[in-house]
Image: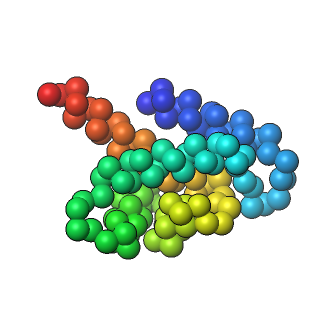
Amino acid sequence: MIQRYAIAQRLQVDFDSSSSESSSSRLSDSSLEENRNRFKRVFNSLKEVGDTMDYAFETVRHEIRQLTGEKIGKETVKNFYYGEGDPKFRIVMLIMGWVDSKEFSGSANNNAE
């Protein structure tokens, strides 16, 4: 939980200090790249052998919806994975919430053994 708070705080600082003040607020490139790499590491570790990337992106989209109640498109998850486009802060937070839940459940499972 502390890790999640620290990540949210770091993202918020990057968000607040961003030079863009438009309604489609963006994260700094380094923070975005760090989060994208973390997402890819978790995504790739959880993807089952034989699953298509399309199926895996749909699974993540569905799990984010279950976790947060927020809608997110499969293409949005795919674009984030491949580094296409410039995602909004809200999208990054939804995806990183999913990452946190997977990392937390993984560490909880390791501690239970």
Q: Is 27 drawn above or below residue 56 in the view shown?
A: above
Given the current orientation, which residue lies at the most extreme left position? 113
Coordinates of residue 24 in the picture (x, y in percent): 74, 61
- Say which quarter of the image contains residue 8: top right
Coordinates of residue 35 in the picture (x, y in percent): 55, 45
Residue name at image x 22 percent, y 34 percent: 109
Coordinates of residue 87 in the picture (x, y in percent): 64, 60
Q: Quadrant of the C terminus?
A: top left
In this orientation, which residue lies closer to the viewer: 94 or 44? Answer: 44
Q: Quadrant of the N terminus?
A: top left
Residue name at image x 40 percent, y 67 percent: 57
Residue name at image x 77 percent, y 41 percent: 16
Coordinates of residue 64 in the picture (x, y in percent): 42, 58
Residue name at image x 35 percent, y 36 percent: 104
Q: Is 83 drawn above or below residue 16 in the view shown?
A: below
Q: How is the image coloured?
A: rainbow
Residue 80 shows up from this direction: yes
Taking 18 as reference, is 43 left or right? Answer: left
Number of numbered markers = 0
Residue 73 shows up from this direction: no
Taking 106 as reference, is 18 left or right? Answer: right
- Say which quarter of the image contains residue 62: bottom left
